[in-house]
Image (tube, rainbow, N blue to C red):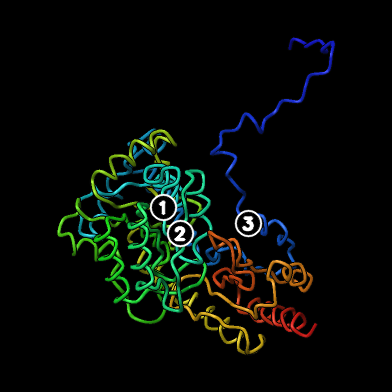
């Protein structure tokens, strides 16, 4: 190796900050990821991360599926593939929705889908409607494209569609019509709320009337453990439009919550003009989702119904234990959602408490959660928190909720 002689004068420090684009300078680390760093102590019970339960992963089935995929496809399983995705997997997804496979795009995790859709649909200053609160990862994906967020009021039933109609009307009158509405209708992250059928129908109708694309994020829809299943916004949009390529609803979902997250297989289904642009955007991002991973998921499809039932049962039990523990350990002033599915519930404490300030005291008692503030696009939520029950055993839920109750009650007594 050739040695480099020392410089005669010290080099100036390079100004990397100035080298960054304006878009890059808007990027922020995920608040949840940062919180997870301080809760990695093995003695801390974490309700913070939205992690599927690893004890429910179908390990032997995945091992057999990997072997089957390599046996069936040989070297093709390890080769570059088409951007659109593995055809048998796209065909299966399309069949579930009753649409052509050409309207399905495989993406590398639903987070990539959000990022690519943000790139395609959001220009600087465009009005994007989001729930208050909403999924932090969506805000993180959209922010580099410099949207103007407008929050939609929510209540225990999710989006207040009457208030939304007023917002849409006001934005149009001001010459700043909304371009995109982002919603999580099933077991919302972070609140666990579910949008009623009546509100779903009105949401689809309003966005169609005002010419607003509606992005439905549905990673948890299959994880219902109580109540009745409801049609997706995409399905309602299809009924309203009568044509898959006139449907203004874009649907995003994932196999991460039903099978395993590590394979990073998800999809977007949308009208042909949106999918055509998604293909181009994905080619610039990663060419295609890993071939072998898609083939493994395809081999796992026969066991998917049984796997979903297994996850539903476990999460239903864990959610029930956490709800019961809230009643036992938290003060009566604490409000909370009682989810019908998914992985999360939401707690609202008295206004004089700040859950960010409270977190270190909770960690001292060996329990962690996510403060609610980062889930609000325009700020707020200082007295709220998100809890995840999916990756906690019954014993951990009992001990962790007791510790959380002690933390909250102690703060209220000061």
Which label lies toward us, 2 or 3? 2
Which label lies toward us, 1 or 3? 1
Q: Is residue 98 left or right of residue 9?
A: left
Could you give the CA–CA distance between mark 1 and mark 2, rounded to whole angstroms? 7 Å
Q: Circle 3 sits on which residue?
A: 31
Image x and y of residue 241, in percent: 18, 59
Could you give the CA–CA distance between mark 2 and mark 3, rounded to whole angstroms? 21 Å
Nearest to N terminus: mark 2 or mark 3:
3
Point 62% across, 58% down: residue: 32
Q: Circle 1 sits on which residue?
A: 127
How packed is label 1: few (under 14 Cα within 10 Å), some, or many (20 or more)?
A: many
Point 77% across, 71% down: residue: 361
Q: Secondary structure at mark 3?
A: helix
Q: Secondary structure at mark 1?
A: strand
Q: Secondary structure at mark 2?
A: strand
Point 20% across, 59% down: residue: 98
Image height of 90 relative to 214, above or below: above
Nearest the viewer among 392 and 414 is: 414
Q: Quadrant of residue 203?
A: bottom left
Nearest to N terminus: mark 1 or mark 3:
3
Image x and y of residue 380, in percent: 59, 66
- Circles 1 and 2, Cβ within 8 Å, touching? The answer is yes
Point 49% across, 75% down: residue: 315
Nearest the viewer among 370 and 255 is: 370
Picture disc at residue 325? none
Q: Circle 2 sits on which residue?
A: 150
Q: Quadrant of the C terminus?
A: bottom right
Residue reaching furthest front? 174
């Amino acid at each position: 190796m050739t040695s480099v002689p020392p410089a005669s004068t010290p080099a100036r420090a390079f100004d990397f900050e100035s080298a960054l684009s304006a878009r890059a300078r808007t990027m922020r680390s995920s608040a949840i990821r940062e919180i997870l760093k301080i809760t990695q102590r093995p003695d801390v019970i974490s309700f913070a991360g939205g992690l599927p339960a690893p004890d429910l992963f179908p390990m032997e089935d995945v091992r057999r599926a990997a072997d089957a995929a390599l046996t069936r496809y040989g070297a093709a399983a390890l080769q570059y593939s088409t951007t659109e995705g593995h055809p048998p997997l796209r065909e299966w997804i399309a069949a579930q929705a009753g649409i052509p496979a050409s309207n399905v795009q495989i993406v590398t995790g639903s987070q990539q889908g959000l990022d690519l859709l943000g790139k395609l649909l959001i220009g600087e200053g465009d009005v994007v409607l989001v729930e208050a609160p909403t999924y932090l990862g969506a805000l993180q994906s959209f922010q580099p494209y410099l949207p103007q967020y407008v929050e939609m009021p929510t209540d225990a039933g999710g989006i207040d569609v009457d208030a939304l109609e007023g917002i849409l009307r006001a934005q149009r009158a001001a010459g700043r019509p909304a371009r995109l509405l982002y919603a999580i209708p099933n077991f919302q992250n972070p609140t666990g709320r579910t949008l009623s059928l009546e509100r779903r129908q009105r949401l689809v109708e309003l966005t169609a009337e005002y010419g607003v694309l509606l992005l439905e994020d549905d990673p948890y829809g299959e994880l219902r453990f109580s109540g009745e299943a409801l049609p997706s916004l995409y399905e309602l949009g299809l009924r309203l439009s009568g044509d898959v390529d006139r449907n203004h609803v874009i649907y995003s979902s994932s196999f991460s919550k039903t099978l395993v997250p590590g394979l990073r297989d998800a999809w977007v289904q949308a009208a042909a003009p949106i999918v055509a642009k998604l293909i181009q955007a994905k080619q610039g991002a990663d060419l295609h989702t890993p071939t072998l991973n898609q083939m493994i998921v395809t081999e796992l499809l026969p066991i998917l119904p049984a796997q979903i039932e297994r996850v539903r049962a476990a999460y239903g039990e864990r959610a029930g234990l956490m709800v019961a523990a809230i009643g036992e350990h938290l003060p009566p002033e604490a409000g909370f959602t009682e989810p019908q599915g998914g992985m999360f519930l939401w707690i609202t404490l008295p206004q004089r408490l700040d859950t960010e300030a409270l977190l270190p005291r909770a960690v001292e008692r060996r329990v962690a959660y996510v403060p609610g503030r980062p889930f609000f696009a325009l700020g707020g939520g200082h007295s709220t928190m998100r809890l995840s029950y999916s990756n906690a055993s019954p014993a951990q839920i009992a001990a962790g909720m007791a510790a959380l109750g002690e933390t909250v009650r102690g703060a209220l007594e000061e």
